[in-house]
Amino acid sequence: MADPDLVLEQTLAESTYLRLRGDIITCALPPGQKLRLEPLKTQYGVGISTLREILNRLASESLVIAEGQKGFAVAPAHEADLREIAELRLLLEGHALALSLERGDLEWEGRVVAAHHKLAAIEKRLLAGEARNIVDWVRYDFSFHNALISACGSAALLSLHATIFDRFLRYHMLASSFRGAGVVGDHQALFELALARDASGAVDMLAGHVGKGVEHVLSTGVLKRAA
């Protein structure tokens, strides 16, 4: 039988990892911020050794950098990194999308329809000015893109894509602005191309979609301010 105290400790460590990771992605912990262990211990309610393990785990995902004897810091944000992440996202997501359109069954279609319905609903509210917080939008955005590639047949590919998507998402959270009607149109087109099983058209649309996302972030000037 598992030690209850050990199970509790592992559960706390995992929940703290998710909290800290979420705070980095949403920029509650902004790029470049020093991650000092004592304040983090108080803020997140876990021990120093557990924090070190979590920060090293986040460093392996390139969300945190280890600064030798200086400790840890949130990974910086800059244009070269954004462009590299975008290229990697497109490489992974484009491949997964083509596989998913080939293999997707009726259950997959249902997931795509449901995810797009939720995304379209929040985007309609954002366009109408009824919603201003983009946190819900980015959650539904990921759910839609994840649904599109969910029939690719590779758990490893889905996991790696989710990690890269979150790094890409951090830049959008840093910019803290919704791209507007253009992104809504992209999602509608992706949805229609996916259901039509047009892999070539969907991958081309995805490439434009990701590229426009990069240019939107750069246009806000937030990376120059972050530097």
Image (cartoon, rainbow, N blue to C red):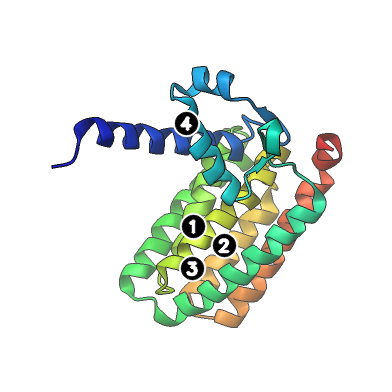
Viewer-nearest of discs 3 and 1: 3
Numbered mark located on residue 144 in the image:
1
Numbered mark located on residue 152 in the image:
none
Residue 150 shows in the view:
no
User: Residue 200, position in %: x, y?
Assistant: 60, 82
Q: Is residue 83 left or right of residue 35?
A: right
Q: Is residue 40 left or right of residue 31?
A: left
Mark 3 and mark 2 lie on one chain; the one further toward the N terminus is 3
Give the class, few, some or many, for how many residues have Cα within 10 Å of label 4's Cα (few <14, many ≥20): few
Measured in 3D between alpha carbons, the distance from the residue under mark 1 to the one under mark 4, in whole angstroms, is 37 Å
Numbered mark located on residue 188 in the image:
2
| Amino acid at pointer 3 | Leu
Residue at disc 4, secondary structure: helix
Whether tag 1 and tag 2 are in contact, CB under 8 A, the answer is no
Image quadrant holding the C terminus, namely top right
Give the class, few, some or many, for how many residues have Cα within 10 Å of label 1's Cα (few <14, many ≥20): many
Numbered mark located on residue 157 in the image:
3
Residue at (57%, 67%) from the top-left corner? Answer: 190
